[in-house]
Image (tube, grey):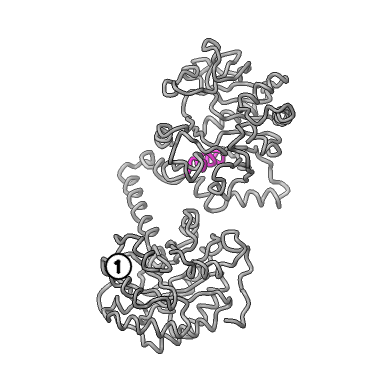
Amino acid sequence: MSGKVSYALRTGSAGTGESKFTAFRRLLTQPELAFIMEAHNGLSAKIAEEAGFKGIWASGLSISAALGVRDSNEASWTQVLEVLEFMSDATTVPIMVDGDTGYGNFNNVRRLVKKLCQRDIAAVCIEDKLFPKTNSFIGEGQPLADIDEFCGKIKAGKDSQLDDDFSLIARVEALISGWGMDEALRRAEAYHAAGADGILIHSKIAHADEVLEFRREWGDRCPVVIVPTKYHATPTGDFRDAGIAMVIWANHNLRASITAMRETSRAIHDSESLSAIETQVATVADVFELAGNDELAQAEARYLASAERTTKAVVIAASRGAKLGELTEDRPKSMLDVRGQPLLRRLVHTFQDAGVRDITVVRGYRKETIDFASVQTVDNEDYANTGEAASLACAADRLAGESVFSYGDVLFRRFILEGLLEAGEHPKNKKDVLLAVDSHGAGKNPAKADRKLDLVAAKQKARRSFLDEQKPAKVKALGNDLDPAKVSGEWMGLAWFSEAGATRARAALDAMAADGNLANASMLDLFNRMIADGAKIGAVYFSGHWLDVDDAFDLARARNLT
């Protein structure tokens, strides 16, 4: 609509600066096949975006089912609009809503489109059936709307849009209702002439022959959208080859959630316990992250004078992890999947559960894959030619005040982090740095016999009685090849810094850079340099309950640890 200006005033789709309306129009008209994923509330919309989808389908069936009603317009359009507002606010990618039949006549469509635009909903799809609608997969031979009357709805919608790039997709139900291909093409041509920006051709047979035939007959008059729910076995390559513009995965988040909720509810009911399912479901921290609790904490720190400053964390996750081969071709090892979540996300959740929320991650290899709303990032652009200490140096300004350091490829139980923090906060603690050290086998882990270990030599070894209260042991040296008789344990890749210790660490990094030793230095080199400069480093002993991920065997063990 050439006389209108863009209504979108937000930051743009997925941080690109373009409006959600423009982003959807680009998806619809790009040469490549586009995919959009079903969502039915703010949470599922966030999950769809998190998975990588560039657009979302707000399914009428799914929204109705999530509200506990039938897909027969039992939920009013204003109730659906309220759900859409939460979905739009929760995401940065464009949303196309399943607008059913338009919730009435042309006048209802006019008001609907205006309200969708006001809520930054990029597109609507309306179908040529009668109000109130019946789901397309129920029954046979459903009646269709009069062509002229439906064209009036399309015109009314296009005349009412508040953004030039708002899209209206006309859904043709002729094949669903058994009216045949000629009728489907006749209706599509009329809807296109009325101003529809695309045609959704719907079919419920178990193969894609009908929709592919429609696409051949239709040609390139306007984009064709499909919903392969019933013909799900058709290879996606067939849709690409046919020139389909967009595929809608229409209801699978809802259906997956039903399966998961049933299984979880039955397991809890039958066992009268949470122990069997606790490790099978998302963590509470994951829920908090999806809900944006960390953004709220940052806002509180900015706007509430009473907000306390928390311990900071720096995580280095710049390396690829070459030993993992093809698994890290498109992502760093810190982003490998561990039972449904990236390893790094699980590590971040461990910090958050322990109250450490100011987290900085140093990225390097495939840095674009590390994009969590709850963490800050800095980049080691020379990650391929530098080591651990150089990655930490990239975030040296974040290592200020009481701080925690961790590798990005380690997992440990929360009690280890909490124990380290408690040791640091103990009034008798006089150490600059505390290291979490595994005393089990004093670093002689048979599972790691073929690799170098981060060994620690301390003044005292761990006592074997858990009743003994043990102060942090003074660390004398760290290395990969220490005298076995002097080894006290293996460093877990987790360290605590006091405010003075963080200052000493930054000074040591600066000194190593000045004398040319920083580029290839390890964290062990940094700690040894600090010891030589007079820093007091202590070992806090634990026994097991952690691992680092170096190869595929470690990855398998990580999936059992969580």
List x then y, in percent, for residue 243. 40, 68
On the rendered image, what quadrant is the N terminus found in? Answer: bottom right
Q: Main secondary structure of the magenta part?
A: helix
Residue at (62% x, 37% y) in the render: 314
Magenta-span inclusion, residue 344: yes
In percent of width and height, residue 279 lies at: 41, 40
Residue 499 visible (yes or no): no
Q: Which quarter of the figure has residue 2? A: bottom right
Point out the image quarter for the C terminus. top left
Residue, x 52% and y 65% (percent of image)?
94
Counting the numbered discs, the total is 1
Range covered by the magenta-colored residues: 342-353
Q: Is residue 236 visible?
A: yes
On the image, which quarter does residue 491 sit in? Answer: top right
- Front in this rendered view, residue 206 or 284: 206
Left or right: where 409 falls relative to 182: right
Disc 1 marks which residue?
208
Q: Is residue 334 above or below residue 19?
A: above
